[in-house]
Amino acid sequence: MGIKERYIEHKSLGSLVQQRPSFGNSNFLKHRYRINLFKAESNRFKSVLDVKIMNIKVRYFTTLRELVGTREDGLELMEGSNLAELLETISIKYGTTAFTYLHVTESGIIDPSIKFLINGVGAQSLCGLETELKDGDVVAIIPPIGGG
């Protein structure tokens, strides 16, 4: 699960669904979802909709909240997705502005002062970016707060 390539056999289609995160020279956590439907018959196409979806609530704090323009967001991910895939979904929705703020490097390293809480538990104490999410999870993204 997670950063390594995952292949899921979709039995009703007889096709291969590939999820492959890329940490190359492009945007952080860029995903490519490829569904090979060439074997699927037209009457079986609707079975693609059988993929289970989970709802994740994301809470943004401090300056990050101002950048994305909302306090809370409800996002849909495929069942079995992890924190890295959630961040990629946020990147697609809000562009690279949020990730520039999070100081994400091309190698996929996030500023260690950024805290991710999953249902109130720090992601660092779980599996980091590879922490698998479950339906109904609440993820809080807390950038550092400075003052003087």
Image: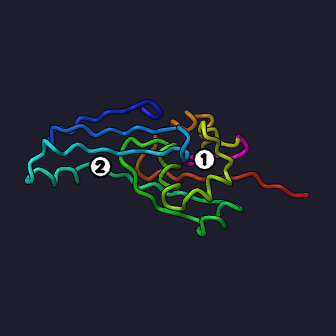
Q: Nearer the viewer, residue 29 or 84?
A: 29
Q: Is residue 118 above or below residue 4?
A: below
Q: Residue at x 66, y 60 (%)?
A: 64
Q: Nearer the viewer, residue 113 or 41?
A: 41
Q: Is residue 80 above or below residue 44?
A: above
**Mark 2 vs mark 1, CA separation in Å:** 24 Å
Mark 2 or mark 1: whose residue is earlier in sequence: 2
Residue 128 disc label: none
Q: Residue furthest bottom?
A: 69
Q: Residue furthest top?
A: 4
Q: Quadrant of the C terminus?
A: bottom right
- Asked which secondary structure carries label 2, the reply is loop
Q: Residue furthest right?
A: 148
Would you say 110 lies left or right of 90 here?
A: right
Q: Could you tell me if the residues under marks 2 and 1 are in contact, i.e. CB atoms within 8 Å?
A: no
Q: Residue at x 16, y 44 (%)?
A: 38
Q: Residues within 10 Å of mark 2 (few under 14, many from 20)?
A: few
- Asked which secondary structure carries label 1, the reply is strand
Q: Where is residue 68? Give x, y as percent.
A: 60, 65
Residue 52 disc label: 2
Q: Which residue is mark 1?
A: 117
Q: Where is residue 77? Give x, y as percent.
A: 40, 51
Amino acid type, mark 1: Leu
Amino acid type, mark 2: Lys
Q: Residue at x 70, y 43 (%)?
A: 111
In the picture, residue 106 is in which quadrant? Answer: top right
Q: Residue at x 70, y 40 (%)?
A: 112
Q: Residue furthest front?
A: 25
Q: Which residues are magenta?
A: 112-119
Query: Does the stretch in magenta take in 3?
Result: no
Would you say 37 lies left or right of 127 here?
A: left
